């Protein structure tokens, strides 16, 4: 294949060439370029539906790419500084799970923080690996989990020298970054793979004066959500590999669960977004940083709120901070994050990323405008004036560090019974309970249910958090392992 430059977008170019040929479709999808579903065309438009096509020789195949998809992956690897990049159409959930499944098998130990995304624990259920959890420090004021301290990693490795990998989420949803380079060096010195859930770090590869990205830090694999800060369509992601990780093995792992009918809308969006970031990313993310810092200053000038930033850096539990994350602690105005989240949406037509018990997150990225930032700041000022009150006794999920009794896989497949939530203290949980977003489990299969955890679930529900993962969508009942 001819050498391409970052100005190319091979999947896009192949789709454009295909469209010009006006091929008569006797394949799937059955809507036949939208002719069989005019309402879908009315919603999405002829151009979009006309590009919703099936894999074929001119367009390559994601399961075994040999032409344009392979070229797009090679360009992505080059842009991200990786040995290889896999285009993923099952979201970063699929990328994270493929990353874990590529290095762990049944009975293997993996060292990781407890506040990982549910996709990580789901991967442990699938492969049977055993988690060795490290409890991150908790900020004494804002109540969020901080980064992985080097000393904690060294202690966990010393106590579990047979572990095969270390996994961390970097940056966290709240912008907290660990000393990724040093942790990677320690993991490698003990023969362990370094895996990074980099769902919220696409911009770290293309911005200046931002925390180090996983590939530059020397990590072996990283899962990157291009659709979050990178501008691609929802559900599109990239899995990066480094340090001689077998491309063929990882592809086989991905193909265990990934669709054989990949969406060319998602694939082309990855291709186009990679090109955009490679050519214009530094300029774009410089503006993102400027807008986020402006918003941070304006919100802090209101009073009551605390939009935190680089001042959290202490070189240990907060080794660095991603300033593009506009996280705001709301307890100072007497409201929970989820209450402010609901008010912004219902009263001001502003949809932010999430609200939890104590914080909100407004995701600032390449599509934002300064006037929208000003509208957000004005709404927050209005909310303080109109709704300031008392949030009551706020507890934080990250303070709750459950006791692990059984492995996730053993617990997930164990025989269970359903009990009223209030009656489950002292029992072993058989399912997930989490607020989504961010999707960090309050409880996971195999963990001991305590009164503190029950109170936190009840408080979260009372304040309007979206509870997910449990068999009972309202979590009035909880599945526990039969005694």
Image (cartoon, rainbow, N blue to C red):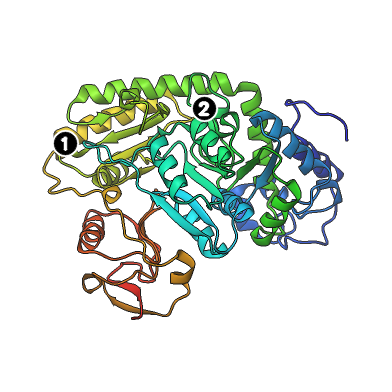
In this view, the residue in front, 379 or 338, is 338
In this view, the residue in front, 432 or 241, is 241
Residue pointed to by mark 1: 333
In the image, what residue occupies the spot 40% across and 39% down?
A: 148
- Residue 42 position within the rendered picture, expressed as x and y whole percent measured from the top left: 60, 51
- Residue 412 position within the rendered picture, expressed as x and y whole percent measured from the top left: 45, 70
Q: Quadrant of residue 466?
A: bottom left
Q: CA distance from mark 1 to mark 2?
A: 34 Å
Q: Is residue 168 above or below residue 281?
A: below
In the image, what residue occupies the spot 64% across and 31% down?
A: 80
Q: Quadrant of residue 150?
A: top left
Q: Is residue 126 left or right of residue 429?
A: right
- Residue 98 position within the rendered picture, expressed as x and y whole percent measured from the top left: 61, 53
Q: Is residue 367 left or right of residue 388?
A: right
Q: Secondary structure at mark 1?
A: helix
Badge 2, how many Cα within 10 Å: few under 14, some, many 20+? many
On-image quarter of the C terminus: bottom left
In this view, the residue in front, 190 or 72, is 190
Q: Is residue 275 left or right of residue 367?
A: right
């Amino acid at each position: 294949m001819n050498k391409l430059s970052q100005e190319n977008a091979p999947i896009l170019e192949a789709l454009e060439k295909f469209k010009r040929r006006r091929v008569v479709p006797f394949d799937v999808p059955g809507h036949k370029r939208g002719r069989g579903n005019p309402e879908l065309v009315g919603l999405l438009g002829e151009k979009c539906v006309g590009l919703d096509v099936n894999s074929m020789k001119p367009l390559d195949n994601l399961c075994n790419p040999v032409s344009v998809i392979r070229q797009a992956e090679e360009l992505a690897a080059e842009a991200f500084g990786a040995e290889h990049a896999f285009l993923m159409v099952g979201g970063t959930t699929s990328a994270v799970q493929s990353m874990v499944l590529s290095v762990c098998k049944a009975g293997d130990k993996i060292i990781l923080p407890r506040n990982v995304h549910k996709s990580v624990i789901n991967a442990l259920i699938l492969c049977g690996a055993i988690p060795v959890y490290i409890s991150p420090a908790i900020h004494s004021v804002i109540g969020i989990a901080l980064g992985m301290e080097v000393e904690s990693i060294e202690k966990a490795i010393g106590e579990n020298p047979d572990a095969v990998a270390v996994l961390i989420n970097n940056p966290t949803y709240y912008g907290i970054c660990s000393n990724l380079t040093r942790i990677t060096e320690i993991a490698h010195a003990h023969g362990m793979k370094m895996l990074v859930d980099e769902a919220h770090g696409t911009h770290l590869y293309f911005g200046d004066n931002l925390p180090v990205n996983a590939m530059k830090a020397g990590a072996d694999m990283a899962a990157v959500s291009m659709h979050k800060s990178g501008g691609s369509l929802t559900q599109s992601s990239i899995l990066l590999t480094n340090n001689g990780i077998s491309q063929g093995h990882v592809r086989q792992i991905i193909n265990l669960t990934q669709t054989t009918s990949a969406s060319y809308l998602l694939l082309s969006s990855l291709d186009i977004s990679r090109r955009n970031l490679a050519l214009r990313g530094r300029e774009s993310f410089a503006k993102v940083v400027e807008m986020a810092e402006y918003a941070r200053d304006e919100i802090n000038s209101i009073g009551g709120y605390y939009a935190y930033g680089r001042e959290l850096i202490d070189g240990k539990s907060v080794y660095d901070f991603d300033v593009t994350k506009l996280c705001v602690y709301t307890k100072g105005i007497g409201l929970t994050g989820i209450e402010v989240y609901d008010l912004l949406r219902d009263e001001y037509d502003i949809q932010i990323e999430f609200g939890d018990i104590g914080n909100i997150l407004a995701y600032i990225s390449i599509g934002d405008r300064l006037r929208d930032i000003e509208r957000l700041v004005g709404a927050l000022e209005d909310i303080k004036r109109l709704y300031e009150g008392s949030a009551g006794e706020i507890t934080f999920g990250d303070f709750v560090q459950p006791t692990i009794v059984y492995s996730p896989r053993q617990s997930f497949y164990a025989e269970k019974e359903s009990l009223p939530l209030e009656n489950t203290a002292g029992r072993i949980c058989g399912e997930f309970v989490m607020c989504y977003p961010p999707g960090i489990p309050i409880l996971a299969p195999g963990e001991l249910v305590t009164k503190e955890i029950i109170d936190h679930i009840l408080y979260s529900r009372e304040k309007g958090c979206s509870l997910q993962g449990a068999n009972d969508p309202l979590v009035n009942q909880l599945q526990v392992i039969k005694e």
